[in-house]
């Protein structure tokens, strides 16, 4: 049989397919994958693109139909209005008038800077609460055995699946009973509680993989428990801690419903603050977009800097060797 | 510099009254100042638990652990002033080698300045030849280098005790032998009392001043390596120590004119009374032959048991070979030289000297007769008295 066969390698070719084993097939596959990537890319990034483009359009161009894909009439009007509004609402009008002889006057009455500061306060507070409670809880859950441990872990998981809005009514009653309406503290508590279960799960994964012998080595090296925690565990957990903090921070930064309902507009955080730029039929979308960009930039820059820790922390590859 | 005593120590994991697991059972070990103790036994025999109790990482359920006659049961690991080398090295991954070495010194309340610590770190690094690695992180080191850093971390503090928990198990075979020698040298140099856990009998034999053989949490034998090898307390020790494994056969001891006669399946031989240290009562025994004690009949003195073996497999190991074959009493494993003329299927005649035979009680498995090295030496020196002067093994 082998003698009749003109191709001695025919035996190896029985499983070949056009798509996976020919050069042409490889090009087809690569093209298909590239196209799909492009589509996903556009799908994800178009909203961001639209925000940026809108921010640089004039009010007139925004209302044009059909809409323009890029600004024909490049304008910083949106940014000017945001800045003027902030100066006016922040009470710096006279300062600017005296210093630069420039009279800021705006129809909108929102101070971007105070929105950002409020949000920072809430987000950092929530992050800290989630981190401290979540890490302590996960350490115990990982290191000790006790009755009801699995049930507790399941409850933590369930609380992540629960939509936060479902328990708003009882939460309102609680807030009212504590007399915490219209305070940032209440948002810190709520956001901290919302993210702590996630932190527990994330950090438990880390502590489960944490080698006992390193803790024992530190005990032998004459560390007390506190010293072991501070000099050995915290530095090794850095990536996971950062990932947990970012997660809690972002949730607090983005959360709208609680902030909108529990605060009045003098104490608004960023999401409800942005919402007040949307004013019925009269919304100036370029102003909204400009405000969004100004607000996103600091967070974006911060995250870009620590995102590598975030990824490492989530994937848990912190300990090797 | 510590005299370590483990006195009647028992460790039970779980509830002692219900389904607790006895990890260590009434263990008594005494280690003199500067001695090197090896805890040897199969997995799960309680050797690591014992070491951890000595280090203070576990608390004994009962019994006492004493350093220089001071009971340390209640003293925490961090206050015992011991140093431990772990199987996985347990280096702090976020610290450089320098920081790893200096960490214990910095934590210690010893009034050392940073410069003092650094000086000591460099001293130890030079001693272990890792001075060029001081600024590397553990992840950048090879296994042997990590091992050296772990050793350095232990010796830098000049502790009362060194504890080694299978420190060589994660290294490759060649490195294991090198590091074994280094640990031995290092310990002799600094003279600090040491306890070393391993399941590798060869490691134990080479490194130990004293071996404690454990099985199922109970001490089987405590003695010098040659005692453990030549006079194993029982069948377990005899089978665990020595490689290849000892050949064991069921036999019966009968009285004979001079000494005793041992009947095996298909063969029998006599043990003259001068080969016996104590009287061996008639009855069932387990007979043990070390593979190394066999020799090809005719190559040496010809008294003692001689029998034929059908060779199944020959495993050459350099100048010697391990031969597996079928003898009249069952499977036989022998380690012999001059094997080049042999091949599988051949018949080989093997002999063993009476003083090399081990006998164990069939019921209690306790030793009845051990391997006597001095007897053989005297016989040899009688037969070759002219040339053996001053030769010592």
Image (cartoon, helix red, strand yellow):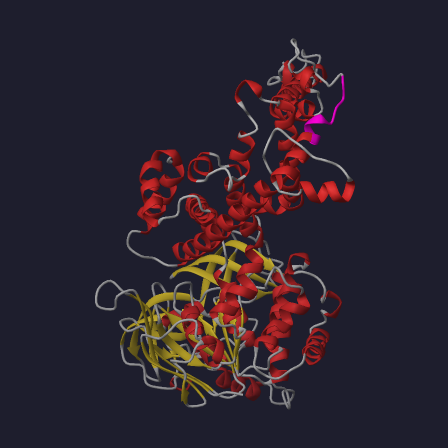
Q: Is residue B336 above or below residue A271?
A: below
Q: In this orientation, which residue lies closer to the viewer: B167 or B226?
A: B167
- Foreground: A114 or A101? A101
Estimate the x, y position of residue A8 in percent, counting from the top left: 70, 18
In this view, B265 is above or below B2: above
Residue B172 or B137: which is nearer the viewer? B137
- Residue A10's x, y, as percent? 66, 17
Percent position (x, y) of residue A233? 53, 61
Q: Which residues are magenta?
A: A73-80
Quarter occupied by the C terminus of chain B = bottom right
Residue A312 seen in render: yes
Q: Residue at x 49, y 72 (%)?
A: A224
In magenta segment, residue B103: no
Can residue B335 be seen in this snapshot? no
Q: Residue furthest top?
A: A66
Identify the image quadrant of the N terminus of chain B: bottom right
Determine which quarter of the picture holds residue B363: bottom left
The residue depicted at 55 percent of the width and 37 percent of the height is: A270
Indicate left or right for B143 with A254 as reference.
right
Residue farthest left in this picture: B17
Q: Please name the residue shown 78% across and 41% down the image.
A: A100
Residue B117 is situated, as x and y percent measured from the top left of the image, at 67, 78
Q: Is residue A76 magenta?
A: yes
Above or below A179: residue A109 = above
């Amino acid at each position: 049989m082998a003698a009749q066969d003109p191709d001695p390698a025919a035996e190896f070719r029985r499983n070949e397919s056009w798509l996976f084993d020919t050069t042409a097939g490889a090009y087809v596959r690569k093209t298909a994958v590239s196209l799909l990537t492009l589509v996903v890319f556009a799908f994800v990034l178009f909203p961001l693109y639209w925000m940026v483009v809108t921010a640089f359009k004039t009010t007139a161009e925004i209302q044009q139909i059909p809409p323009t894909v890029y600004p024909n009439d490049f304008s910083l009007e949106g940014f000017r209005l945001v800045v003027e509004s902030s100066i006016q609402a922040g009470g710096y009008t006279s300062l600017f008038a005296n210093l630069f002889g420039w009279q800021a006057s705006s129809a909108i009455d929102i101070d971007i800077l105070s929105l950002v500061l409020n949000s920072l306060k809430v987000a950092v507070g929530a992050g800290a609460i989630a981190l401290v409670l979540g890490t302590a809880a996960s350490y115990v859950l990982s290191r000790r055995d006790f009755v009801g441990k699995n049930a507790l872990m399941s409850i933590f998981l369930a609380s992540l699946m629960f939509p936060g809005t479902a328990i708003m009514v009882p939460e309102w009653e609680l807030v009212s009973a504590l007399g915490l309406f219209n305070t940032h503290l209440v948002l810190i508590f709520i956001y901290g509680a919302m993210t702590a279960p996630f932190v527990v799960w994330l950090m438990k994964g880390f502590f489960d993989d944490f080698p006992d012998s390193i803790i024992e080595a530190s005990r032998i090296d004459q560390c007390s428990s506190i010293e072991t925690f501070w000099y050995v565990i915290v530095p090794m957990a850095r990536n996971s801690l950062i990932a947990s903090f970012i997660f809690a921070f972002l949730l607090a930064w983005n959360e709208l419903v609680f902030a909108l309902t529990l605060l009045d507009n003098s104490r608004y955080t960023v999401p409800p603050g942005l919402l007040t730029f949307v004013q019925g039929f009269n919304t100036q979308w370029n102003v909204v977009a400009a405000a969004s960009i100004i607000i996103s930039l600091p967070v974006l820059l911060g995250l870009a800097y620590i995102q590598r820790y975030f990824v490492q922390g989530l994937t848990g590859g912190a300990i090797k060797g | 510099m510590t005299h370590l005593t483990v006195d009647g120590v028992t460790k039970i994991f779980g509830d002692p009254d219900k389904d607790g697991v006895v990890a260590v059972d009434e263990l008594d070990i005494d280690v003199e100042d500067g001695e090197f103790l090896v805890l040897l036994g199969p997995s799960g025999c309680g050797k690591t638990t014992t070491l951890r109790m000595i280090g203070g990482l576990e608390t004994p359920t009962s019994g006492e652990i004493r350093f220089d006659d001071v009971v340390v049961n209640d003293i925490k690991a961090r206050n015992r002033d011991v140093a431990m080398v772990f199987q996985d090295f347990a280096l702090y991954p976020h610290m450089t080698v320098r920081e790893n070495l200096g960490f214990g010194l910095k934590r210690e309340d010893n009034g050392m300045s940073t410069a003092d610590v650094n000086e000591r770190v460099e001293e130890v690094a030079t001693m272990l030849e890792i001075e060029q690695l001081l600024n590397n992180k553990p992840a950048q080191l090879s296994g042997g280098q990590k091992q050296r850093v772990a050793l350095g971390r232990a010796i830098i503090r000049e502790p009362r005790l060194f504890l080694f928990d299978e420190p060589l198990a994660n290294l490759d075979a060649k490195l294991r032998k090198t590091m074994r020698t280094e640990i031995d040298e290092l310990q002799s140099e600094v003279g600090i009392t040491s306890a070393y856990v391993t399941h590798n009998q060869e490691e134990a034999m080479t490194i130990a001043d004293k071996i404690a053989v454990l099985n199922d949490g109970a001490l089987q034998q405590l003695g010098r390596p040659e005692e453990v090898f030549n006079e194993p307390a029982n069948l377990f020790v005899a089978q665990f120590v020595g490689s290849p494994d000892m050949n064991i056969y069921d036999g019966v001891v009968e009285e004979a004119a001079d000494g005793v006669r041992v009947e095996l399946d298909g063969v029998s031989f006599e043990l003259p009374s001068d080969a016996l240290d104590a009287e061996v009562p008639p009855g069932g025994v387990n007979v043990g032959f070390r593979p190394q004690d066999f020799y090809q009949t005719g190559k040496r003195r010809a008294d003692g048991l001689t029998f034929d073996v059908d060779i199944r497999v020959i495993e050459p190991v350099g100048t010697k070979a391990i031969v597996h074959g079928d003898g009249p009493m069952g499977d036989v494993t022998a380690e012999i030289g001059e094997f080049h003329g042999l091949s599988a299927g051949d018949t080989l005649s093997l002999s063993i000297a009476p003083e090399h035979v081990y006998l164990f009680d069939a019921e209690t498995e306790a030793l009845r007769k051990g391997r006597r090295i001095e007897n053989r030496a005297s016989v040899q020196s009688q037969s070759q008295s002219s040339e053996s002067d001053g030769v010592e093994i």
